[in-house]
Amino acid sequence: MEESGERVVACPWCDEPEEIEMVAEFGSHLMVSQYICRSCRSPFEVIRR
Ligand SMILES: [Zn+2]
């Protein structure tokens, strides 16, 4: 897993970083943000830093 320091969000299902849309700044926890992948229409959460 690469850690470049930049917050690059990629879809965990199709690994598509260009079709990601943030749907909520806070997800099920305060430390995660909710995103949805427009490519495969799958929602997922990313841990905020
Ligand atoms: Zn996807």
Image: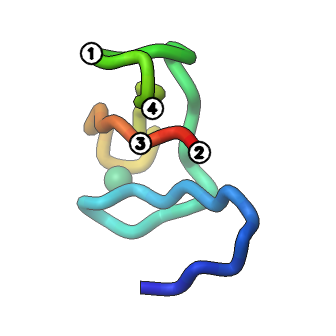
Query: Looking at the image, which residue is at 51% across and 17% down?
Result: 23
Residue 35 is marked as 4
What type is the residue that disc 3 sits on? Val
Q: Secondary structure at mark 3?
A: strand
Q: Quadrant of residue 44?
A: top left
Q: Is residue 28 left or right of residue 33?
A: left
Residue beneath label 2, please? 49
**Do tag 4 and tag 3 residues touch (Cβ < 8 Å)?**
yes
| Residue 3, placed above or below residue 38 | below
* Measured Cα–Cα span from mark 1 to mark 4: 12 Å
**Do tag 1 and tag 4 residues touch (Cβ < 8 Å)?**
no
Residue beneath label 1, please? 28
The colour mode here is rainbow
What type is the residue that disc 1 sits on? Ser
Residue beneath label 3, please? 46
User: From the viewer's perspective, is the residue at label 4 or at label 2 nearer?
Assistant: 2
Tell me which label, 3 or 1, sits earlier in the chain.
Answer: 1
What type is the residue that disc 4 sits on? Tyr
